[in-house]
Amino acid sequence: MQFPESWLRTFVNPDLDTDELSHRLTMAGLEVEETVPVAPAFSGVVVACIVDVGPHPNADRLHVCQVDDGSGSPLQIVCGAPNAVAGIKVPLARIGARLPGDVKISKAKMRGVESFGMLCSGRELGLSQDHAGLLVLDAEAGVGQPVREALDLDDAVFTIKLTPNRADCLSILGVAREVAALTGAPLTLPHTEPVPVDLEDHLSVDVLAPDLCGRFSGRIVRGVNARAATPQWMKSRLERAGQRSISALVDISNYVMLELGRPTHVFDLQRIRSGLTVRWAQKGETLELLNGQTVELDPDVGIIAADGVVESLAGIMGGEATAVTLDTTDIFLEAAFWWPEAIMGRAKRYKFSSEASHRFERGVDFGSVREHLERMTRLIVDICGGHAGPIDDQVVNLPARAPVTMRLQRCHNILGVAVPQAEVERIFTSLNLPFTESKGAYHVTPPSYRFDISIEEDLVEEIARIYGFERIPDRPPLARVEMRVAPETLRGPHSLRRILADLDYQEVINFSFVEEVWETEYAGNTDPIRLLNPIASQLAVMRSSLIAGLVANICHNANHKQNRVRVFELGRVFSRDDRVSDGDLSVAGVSQPQHLAGAAWGPAFEEQWGVPTRNVDFYDVKMDIVALLGKRASSLVCVAAAHPALHPGRSARLVLDGRDIGWLGELHPRLAQQAELTHAPVVFEVDVEAISRACLPAPVALSRQPVVVRDLAIWVNAKVSYQDLSDTLAQTIASNATLGVVKDIRLFDIWRDKAAGAASEKSMAFRFWLQDSETTLDDARVERCMNLLLEALASTHGVRLRA
């Protein structure tokens, strides 16, 4: 929310400067994001009246002006502005004045004619970007008066960032109430003289939806002059509050909303044939809004209709058909209380937001509807003229205001400071919170404009805010120190992140809500979990995989001329699971495990002279996973399998200790082409819980005996995988005590005879490391071991020794 400080000080004027006032508001929970002056510093500029304008003898585009600056004698000013005419009042920078940018005005001679100052445009004073002509001032401004005083430029604009529960502070009045409570300064409400009722006209209003509208007030005003000029003081306040002046009627409505927090609407009475009906929309109904957008309405959207035709979105925005124009003479003023639950999310559904919906969906004062409508009527009659009818006020269904109890001892326990009882009562009184006290407990009835007070802790918060967080002593808690032993076999998220960072990956954090097409194409998920209130229309579902987000990160970097990208993310994914019940960190029917995913794209290594450049491949990323798993990597198995996001022939399901833990592979060519990547990245995604356990280190005595190395080359059917052979060797070694001397096995060569074409066999070469802890291995024992291994492979897979 944005507003000028001077407007706030008409309600409450504490003895604080701008910075101190800003600090007090921030510490009370109304965070002041910034305070900026309405105009840059300048001096020596006064209001002057142009008395006479004559041509310049030596220049067609210059004028010689005689200017009255209030000093008693006219000044001669040479000016080139096209709007310089006699009789207008403009800013005059006298000799010696300093303008923004440290520009000093001195006497000058322009084309042979002396000029004793400078007439200024808005841009030269730093007030706007307009430099097409002089800044024309109000005719009522006093000649010789400083411009800063005439335009009230010694002012600051506050921008406050409010939390969603403080809708009561979305107005000058609301902020003023807070300032009065914080400083003790008196609160001065704007005086409104009731408008005389000159008409007996009524417009019937039928409220058919009490769960939509709790109170509806309205009145007819006839004979208004919609072309009347908005007063300069009102225009100035609106502009400094971020509102553009449109017309007198619209400006007054916006002014009341900013001043009192009451959104209102002005109907053109001539366009309403009969009475109004407040109801829920019917499916298929449409409405053209004031912003030019035509929306199709849903049955859960509130509307105001006339003769069966929708005229306004209730509490959100009016319709174009009944909007006031400069030719409007008769109007109907509407002020209502709309239930927050009936307004929440409706504007966002139609991809726009309005000041009215922003307030109504948070809660607007339902107790002062009539008084606010009276204030608006007074402003309209004073500015636009007209005759008003009586106020029709229908109270249909207002929120109940049940007292909230706060125990004084509970307040002391939460805050950690014993706020005196008298201070508590003073705070409640300053906040206009009616209360009664009995046996150390306060029973507080929230006022009609406070929708954020419903439980005991809300009242404790009010005490803390006004008492002052800075007054609460900073006392560290005292407790017995218990040294806890960190489990050696548990690797937390930070440990996993550190390992991947050491492997040259950079961490990213993506949204948990994604595009629905990502779920379909990257995860094969045709029934994703949908959001009821997405922050954007395209981010409408919860992710069940992290891969799509990483691909988007790669695309972003590739578009910014990065040729090597390695990223990872550790975060939750979401899928349907009926086995999950409600809990502290879970929702019934929704599984939310943590996954760790990575993606590598571009060269395998940074460009350098010692290593040839090649793109990262499947085995590069597999080695990163091996490094991530540590000692447990010996139990990792890659099983060829298909995944919607991965290349059909270059993807694998990752199995650890017999359990599926994730996927590894090259991105599907179709998806790489959609992403406009020159080549496909290699990606992986694993379950964090499955890899968070590490092997406990166990000491083993080092053997003093030499290691024997043997190679074994075999022919095997081309369809037999290395994993099949490796499993057979492992089982054979585990089941035969003789083979206990075999310490390690590695595949170091695969060869196919190119001359044989699509051969049915391939050659695979294994290297074995053998060592006994007690004795030196002789050739006979080594050969016996090698023969046992060969026989196991031959009997299981039909291999034969390669000559």
Image (tube, grey):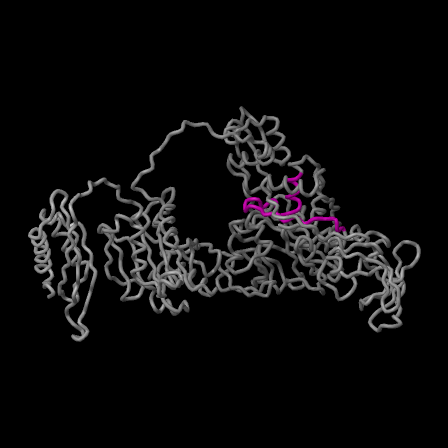
Quarter placement of the C terminus:
bottom left
Q: Look at 23% across and 40% down and name the residue there.
A: 698
User: Is residue 124 located in the magenta-colored stretch of the structure?
Assistant: no
Residue 481 visible to the viewer: yes
Residue 151 percent across, percent down from the top left = 77, 53
Does residue 319 appear to the left or right of 734 in the view shown?
right
Q: Which image quarter: residue 277?
A: bottom right
Residue 134 percent across, percent down from the top left = 79, 63
Q: Look at 59% across and 26% down and name the residue there.
A: 421
Does residue 779 appear to the left or right of 607 in the view shown?
left
Q: Look at 41% across and 59% down and name the residue there.
A: 549
Q: Nearer the viewer, residue 31 or 539?
A: 31
Does residue 366 appear to the left or right of 687 in the view shown?
right
Q: How many marks?
A: 0
Q: Look at 16% across and 72% down and name the residue there.
A: 759
Numbered range of the magenta stretch: 152-179
Q: Nearer the viewer, residue 373 or 207?
A: 373
Q: Which image quarter: residue 100?
A: bottom right
Q: Specify the farthest residue to the right.
A: 73
Q: Is residue 499 above or below residue 121?
A: above
Residue 42 percent across, percent down from the top left = 77, 53
User: Is residue 174 located in the magenta-colored stretch of the structure?
Assistant: yes
Q: Nearer the viewer, residue 286 or 598?
A: 598
Q: Nearer the viewer, residue 186 or 64?
A: 64
Does residue 450 appear to the left or right of 599 in the view shown?
right
Residue 557 percent across, percent down from the top left = 45, 62
Residue 261 visible to the viewer: no
